[in-house]
Image: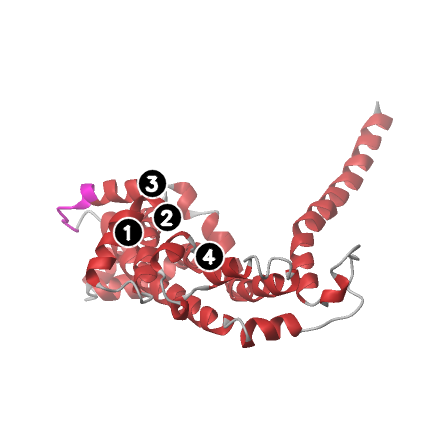
Amino acid sequence: MNTNIKVKRILTRIFKPVAGIIIVLITVFPIYWLVAMSVRPMSEMTGHISLFPHSFTFEHFAELFVEKGFGTALINSIEVTLISLAVSLLFGLCASYVLTRNRFRVAIKKPLNTWILIVRILPPIAFTIPLYIMFNKLGIMNTKIPIIMACILINIPFIIWFMVGFFRNLPEDMEKSARVDGANEWQLFTKIVLPLVLPGIAAVAMLSFMYAWNEYTYSIIFVQSPSTYTIPLKLALLNSDDTLTNFGLVAAGGVVSAIPMLLFIIFAQNYLITGLSSGAVKE
């Protein structure tokens, strides 16, 4: 009996690290292959493709920015993502805080909760026709404003839904003490409440950033000028009939598009893990 238990423990100790290594390899390999294809010469992409490149080249990245105008798409994506994220966080955090405090008498609390639920349930494509009609009448279809507004429309309800749990878990005693000491509502919100929910803000900012950065549905419908193409739309156009076999060019575009997201994750990963495992789950 003791021998069987010892054997099981030994097998468990061996199985766990082996399984972990296999999972890591399966997860990391597509990323490695993307990077390897982006620096592999075209001469090595015919016939049998080796696991490791025999030589390296940056010609795909040069073609991407010099001939394909990927730099413009990169700047457009950065502008759309940062502007929509800033506006979404401003309104989303304020709204979620107001919804969780009984001292704020807002007549539209129930309709707002219903709107949040509807936007969370319906797929983004459901809003395409009304948004298209509205943007077309406003005459802003040839600008980046439609994409920014569409991202804001999707992200604000998500931020409210996510952050309500964080704000509800905060005791209101601190806020009462701060008001007694003379703090106004804005000081109370920015200097006392927000620092306490910083992990949640980082987590929701990360997820909202990912949505806006990778937004494709609205881009392909609302963007009508090459000067306003974003990265997802530009990557889709790289997969045309003329460039379908240029795997290195498409892979280079994928690498460039992943760099901002990777940097964001590196700097926000601690807050992201804490945020995803706390407030939203406790609600």
Mark 1 in CB contact with mark 2 (< 8 angstroms): yes
Choose the circle earlier in sequence order: 2 or 3: 3
- Amino acid at the residue labelled 2: Phe
Q: Nearer the viewer, mark 4 or mark 2?
A: 4
Q: CA distance from mark 1 to mark 2?
A: 9 Å
Q: Is residue 165 visible?
A: no
Q: Which mark is residue 96?
A: 1
- Amino acid at the residue labelled 3: Leu
Chief secondary structure of the magenta span? Answer: loop
Choose the circle earlier in sequence order: 4 or 2: 2
Q: Which mark is residue 196?
A: none
Residue placed under numbered mark 3 in the picture: 122
Mark 4 in CB contact with mark 2 (< 8 angstroms): no
Q: Seen in the image, is 76 located left or right of residue 103?
A: right
Q: Which mark is residue 162?
A: 2
Determine the secondary structure under disc 2. helix
Q: Nearer the viewer, mark 3 or mark 1?
A: 3
Determine the secondary structure under disc 3. loop
Given residues 151 and 47, the one toward you in this image is 47
125 falls in the magenta region = no
Q: Is residue 255 visible?
A: yes
The stretch in magenta equals 104-111
Choose the circle earlier in sequence order: 3 or 4: 3
Q: Nearer the viewer, mark 2 or mark 3?
A: 3
Given residues 177 and 253, the one toward you in this image is 253
Q: Dot 2, how many residues are within 10 Å of its Cα: few (below 14), some (14-19), or many (20+)?
A: many
Quadrant assignment for the N terminus: top right
Q: CA distance from mark 3 to mark 4?
A: 19 Å
Q: CA distance from mark 4 to mark 2?
A: 20 Å
- Rendered location of residue 46, percent (x, y): 75, 58
